[in-house]
Image (cartoon, rainbow, N blue to C red):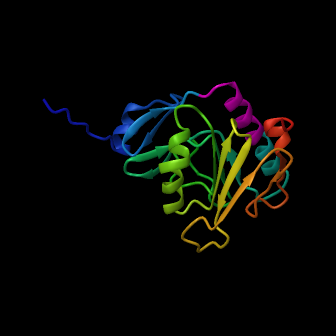
Amino acid sequence: MTTTFTRMTAEQYFAASTEGDRRQLVDGVMVVNEPGVRHAMAQMVLLTTLGIWTRGGEGRGAALPPVDVQMTDRDVYGPDVVWFREGRVPPDRDAAPPHIPDLAAEVRSPGTWRHDVGRKKSVYENHGLPELWLVDTAAKVVLVYRRAAPGSVVFDVELELGPGALLTSPLLPGFSLDLIELFGPPG
């Protein structure tokens, strides 16, 4: 007997999911995100620091906790932190964003990390995400992928930052996060 598996579409995902259910759709498969305390603490530091930066001046856009971001007809991600630049902040606060963010941060979680560093990174890159931060709480590093020029078709800058380094971005003038605040002291 042969068992067949049908992958979900984004439309089916939205019909089946509920707000806050910690699910994502990766290549048509519903994946459950099961974050632990370390994940939650890293996510809080990122979101708080980015949120303070956005409120520190005019025209700095908006930082948000996880929201559904439809990337393809079979991929709906819930990045741990997203940032939309001014002019691209989603106008309808009760709906999924109509476009991808300008920056997405994914924090290591047992159920999603292999997807984060694999398919999700690839889909983000192929669909024009300007910058991606992959926060590996186990290795205490942030993998930064960005495009050096707005028209670049691939992530042409790749950085690996550890405790003591500063996380900055050309997208966020004046933003800086000492990674000791994210991971604690080295060692």
User: Of residues 105 and 94, which is closer to you in this image?
Assistant: 105
Where, quadrant-wise, is the C terminus in this rendering? top right
Magenta: main secondary structure equals helix
- Seen from the viewer's position, the closer of residues 115 and 49 is 115
Residue that appears at 15% across and 33% down: 2
Task: Please indicate, yes or no, whether residue 95 appears anywhere in the rendered image.
Answer: no
**The N terminus lies in quadrant:** top left
- Magenta stretch: includes residue 120: no
Residue 19 image point, x, y percent:
51, 31
- The image shows residue 166 at horizontal and vertical percentages of 84, 52
Q: x, y (%) of residue 178? A: 85, 46
Residue located at (82% from left, 44% from top)? 163
Q: Residue furthest top?
A: 37
Residues drawn in magenta: 35-47
Count of marks, rendered view: 0
Location of residue 84 (image quadrant):
bottom right
173 on left or right of 9: right
